[in-house]
Image (cartoon, rainbow, N blue to C red):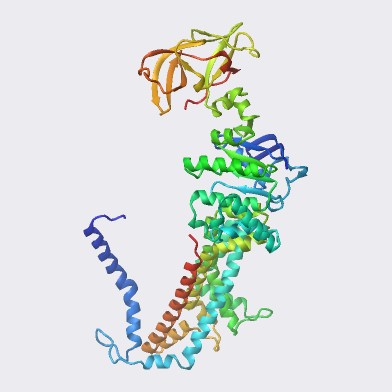
Amino acid sequence: MLVHSRGARWAVWAVFALLFLPLFALPLLVVLGASFATHWSGALPSGPTTANYRTVVRGEALHALTTSLLTAVAASVLALTVGTWAALAAAALGRGRRRVLDALFVLPVAVPSVVVGLSVLVAFSRPPLLLNGTRWIVILAHTVLVTAFAYQSVSAALARLDPAYEQAAASLGAGPAYVLWRVRLPLLLPSLTAAAGLCFALSMGELSATMMLYPPDWTPLPVLIYAATDRGALFTGSAVAVVLMAATLLVLFAVSRARTRASYR
Amino acid sequence: MSIRFDSVTVAYDGNVVLDALDLTVAPGEVMALLGPSGSGKTTALRAVAGFVRPASGRVLLGERDVTDLPPHRRGIGMVVQQYALFPHLRVEDNVAFGLKARKTPKAEIRRRVAEALEMTGMAAYARRHPRELSGGQQQRVAIARALAIRPAVLLLDEPLSALDARLRSGMLAELARLHRELPEVSILYVTHDQMEALTLADRIAVMDKARLQACGTPQELYRAPANAFTASFVGNANLLPVTVPARGAVLGDAELTLDTAGAAAGARATLCVRPHLVGLGEGPNRLTGTVREIQWRGATHRLYVDVAGHTVRADLPELREAPAHGERITVHFAPEDAVLLAAGVSGDEH
């Protein structure tokens, strides 16, 4: 333990609570409070109601929730596949070419996501690749944005993977494909699920690139929240935000359960 | 199956880590590759396994040139220092891994897994995961896994170095027993521990600085080492610079009687004598000096005696009255216990 004395430990906890609560927890609590309110003029929200949620589970918002979930699942699966594949390929490259690949995959994160949205829009607005106006352009943009994270976490896990496992497998007569399926991927599974959770959460909350791309029949939840607050419906917006938060946390929780079962050491 | 290194050279970025190794392991033979770290012994083993590619030279298994074959086509059993058991598979699936990869029929897999686990005494642990096993047990599973594919060649890379001293001597006896049960398997055993090599090997190849220094049976290397490095690394011999007049040898002002055949008269040479063959008191080939250090090691006393500016180590059966620090004493050795080597630097003192 880094901090030994009892008093010092209390002090550290106090500083942590002071910094953490207002910065991280309180804003979320405010949204939760607002989602049950009709007015908020004093220190606390007033006029408790569940009407906001009744709007949410009907029509538009429910459709947006499915849209968000489908987009996030599709983007995570695609990103994980592409990212893992690229990371495996990069691991087999020499240092120089791996750097190039690393830089390429970090590009969508380094560039503001509005720019990514715009470039996807410009690139896919003309035949032969006319995706503008379809749901695929949203999924594509999300995939581009989150693949970087999948690639990075799988790369990091691969670098930590002891080559002795692959070599032991090879010496036992397993060809490269067999080693990949029976040894490397199973050993990478904890990192793969972690990456999947991260990709999913990022995609669920993506707004700036989505704003430039979404067609009317494919409106993800963040866009709906933005639209609601923009037209002044702050409390409905809060209720939608709570639904978004809950859905994301629920999926992440399920993924982390799967992950603890998948880790061996 | 025999293993043959035909002038195998391995280099990384222009650094030669294995220099033109010529060595043949006979079918059924246990060959130890003995040397300090960085001597090229592990590189030689990895060249057989197929994990390093020789810059030149060939590796042959039996009559087959395997230099250009990938590791999984070589049919070699291998056990490495940290065992590398697959953490996500149970013991039985670890052992079955090689058989499944070769698409062996299921009934056959079951039979051979049971057999390999039986042989290594791990049958009771078949359903465990590797993390639930101790180091010694993991070691046995790693050996069972390598033996299940019935390899004609078994490569062992420092297999005992992760175990504590007591477990190590037990496993050493175990390995000797396994080899008696599988006499047709050739074993290449990489180690830095001379005791392991002396105990287990039919022949020892001593490596240093990327080169093969000597190769022979343990007795040959121990009694008549070919050079100073071998003498000091195997059995930790005293190496003393002497001059060789017409007959005998001279160290400081002591005249010694020994077989000087092969050494040119008047030449400088290195006298090699094992510490446990040095006796206390008067005798042939006397050396007189001061006791610099005395260590009690239970069954023996180790004396460091300064003789004419050189340190002579003597391992003596426990002494009733041990000489005191700084005392002047005389030690001796029999002429037939000494070997004269071409002049070289004296070895490290251990």
Left or right, A46 with respect to A192, comes to: left
Q: Is residue B289 left or right of residue A164?
A: left
Does residue B207 appear to the left or right of B305 in the view shown?
A: right
Task: Indicate the quadrant containing the N terminus of chain A: top left, top right, bottom left or bottom right.
Answer: bottom left
- Nearer-the-camera pick, A16 or B130: B130
Given residues B315 and A53, the one toward you in this image is B315
Towards the viewer: A70 or A111: A70
* Image x and y of residue B181, in percent: 65, 44
Whether residue A164 appears in this view of the structure is yes
Residue B198 vertical position relative to residue A210 in the rendered view, above or below:
above
The residue that appears at 59% across and 54% down in the rendered structure is B117
Image label count: 0
Q: Position of residue B265 (x, y in %)?
A: 62, 8
User: x and y percent of residue A94 in the render?
Assistant: 62, 53
Furthest residue in direction top, as rendered: B246
Determine the image quadrant of residue A231: bottom left
Q: Is residue B28 above or below residue A154?
A: above
For the view shown, which residue lies furthest in the right direction? B63
Q: Quadrant of residue B317?
A: top left
State whether residue A93 appears in this view.
no
